[in-house]
Image (cartoon, rainbow, N blue to C red):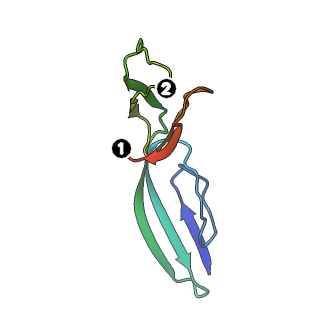
Amino acid sequence: MAYLWNFAGGAENSDEKDPENVVFGEPGDYPVTYVVTDENGKQALAEMRLTVIPNLSPEASVLSPDPDRIVDAGGSVSFEGEIAGGNPPFDFLWDFGPGGLGTESRNQEI
């Protein structure tokens, strides 16, 4: 059997049966074809269209508390953040430095 994956210039073509992780360097619409040729020269063709989106950096902002908030030692403050842009899901981390408790990291689909 012979195999040919054609990624229409979006990635390097492959002659592997299963090319696994294919990296598309640029955003765009790519027609993808897969041709299998048997030992008698007969072929089977499969086609699909793949849309590659740009890898955008997310923008993070703190919604609350207000930037000039004063808190007594031992007191607590609730924090709320917002993420705009980027490509979900996101991993995010609140880092409260050496005096803060409650550092949290999780994955979030927005």
Q: Report the side of 13 relative to 31 (left or right).
A: right
Residue tagged 2: 74
Q: Secondary structure at mark 2?
A: loop
The residue type indicated by label 2 comes to Gly
Name which residue lies at 41% across and 27% down: 77
Name which residue lies at 48% across and 64% down: 33
Give the x, y percent position of residue 52. 45, 47
Counting residues from the N terminus, which is met first, the one under dot 1 or under dot 2?
Answer: 2
Q: Are marks 1 and 2 in contact (CB under 8 Å)?
A: no
| Disc marking residue 110 | 1
Q: Report the side of 60 relative to 12 (left or right).
A: left
Query: Viewer-proximal residue, 35 or 81?
Result: 81
Task: Kindly report the distance in space between the C-alpha atoms of the residues bearing marks 1 and 2.
Answer: 33 Å
Viewport quadrant of the C terminus: top left
Name which residue lies at 52% across and 72% down: 35
The residue type indicated by label 1 comes to Ile
Neighbour tally class for label 2: few under 14, some 14-19, many 20 plus, Cα within 10 Å: few
Give the x, y percent position of residue 9. 54, 49
What is the number of callouts on the image?
A: 2
Q: Is residue 36 above or below residue 24?
A: below
Name which residue lies at 44% across and 25% down: 75
